[in-house]
Image: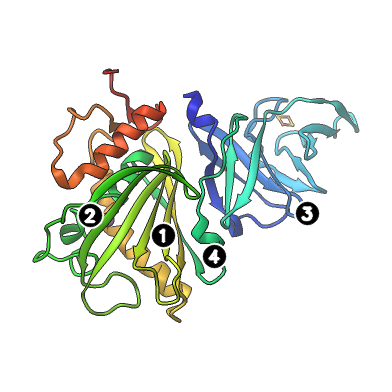
Amino acid sequence: MDFERTLWHPVARADALPAAQLFGAVLLDARIVVWRDSVGALHAWEDRCPHRGTALSLGCVRNDRLQCAYHGWQFDGDGKCAHIPALNRGLPAAQILQIYEAKEKYGMLWVRLQKSGSEIPPFPEFENAALMKVHCGVYEVATSAPRIIENFLDMAHFGFVHDGILGDTDHTEVPDYAVSNFNDARGEGILATQCFAWQPRSNATIAQGTMVEYTYRVCAPYTSILTKIPAAQNGFAEAIALFVQPVTHETSRAWFVLAVTDTGAGDDNLQAFQDTIFAQDKPIIESQSPKRLPLDLRAEAHCAADKMSSAYRRYLQDQGVGFGVIPSQRS
Ligand code: FES
Ligand code: CO
């Protein structure tokens, strides 16, 4: 599973972790504690006290140190033991904690378990100051991260799962679309273009049905970004990013980050719209069996409308992804 450990993964919205607070999380089956010091600097460590193995996430942040709940050992931001109350001194020389890398980007907190040259997935639309940013979620989902991404890439379910909103039962055909590889300022991965769908209510502000055109791209194993074509009137491409935290092979947490024109709808309305949509998807994707995405294309039946799904499965196989999938035994 080493490949996934070399990638950056989202673990929380940045605003979910105030200064001098901590939380425990699970990423790729690893228990981590994420905390901030008093000036907001971010840390991610193995969630295990080196003294007696207690979860550090049961502790608290004191004077820019993480204090274990059991015997009160305090660890500074470098992971060194700065204070042992029973001895009234520290062990400052030794760094005895497993430290991971943590960063803040796109209003999210990201953690990488193993050093590598990887970047946080590119989301250039977020950098566009003309677009309003709205964070939706977290959505806790009892399925693998790839099942969630694949559902996001799937247009054939709109008329059934999202009847009256993203599709309707009288317009269930998926017109042919194009799938290609891409490698540019948006990163590298697979791209679906000319994706047309008739949508009764394509977003929180549109009350009447319209034909919409989307692109979908996958620029990391558990990240997908949708853009709306044509760009909004002011020439800026609106986008919705789906970031998924692979918790265990078969459980995940997901967020949508919207970069959209400010129509005055308000964050609450946009969030409520995404909540409604995701609540419709959730029972479907949690019911899928197996929960790990099978990468052998013979394992499930595909039709022409699924070619982005098929491309995604091939992409995961080619990248060597092993977490949340059933790898194909075929070379
Ligand atoms: Fe953490 Fe003893 S187990 S201080
Ligand atoms: Co859906």
Quick one: 324 or 46, which is closer to the camera? 324
Q: CA distance from mark 1 to mark 3?
A: 32 Å
Q: Which residue is mark 3?
A: 38
Q: Is residue 204 above or below residue 75?
A: below
- SS at badge 1: strand
Q: CA distance from mark 4 to mark 2?
A: 27 Å
Q: Nearer the viewer, mark 4 or mark 3?
A: 4
Q: Nearer the viewer, mark 4 or mark 2?
A: 4
Residue located at (51% from left, 49% from top): 122
Residue 167 placement, left or right of 1: left
Q: Amino acid at mark 4?
A: Asn
Marks 4 and 1: in contact by CB < 8 Å?
A: no
Q: Which residue is mark 2?
A: 155
How many discs appear?
4
Q: Which quarter of the frame holds ligand 2?
A: bottom left
* Dot label at residue 23: none
Quarter occupied by residue 51: top right
Q: Nearer the viewer, mark 1 or mark 4?
A: 4
* Dot label at residue 128: 4
Q: Which residue is mark 1?
A: 240
Q: Amino acid at mark 1?
A: Ile
Q: Earlier in the sequence, mark 4 or mark 3?
A: 3
Q: CA distance from mark 4 to mark 3?
A: 30 Å
Q: Amino acid at mark 2?
A: Met
Expressed as whole percent of the image width and height from the top left, the position of residue 117 reads 60, 33
- SS at badge 4: loop
Q: Amino acid at mark 3?
A: Ser
Q: Earlier in the sequence, mark 2 or mark 1?
A: 2
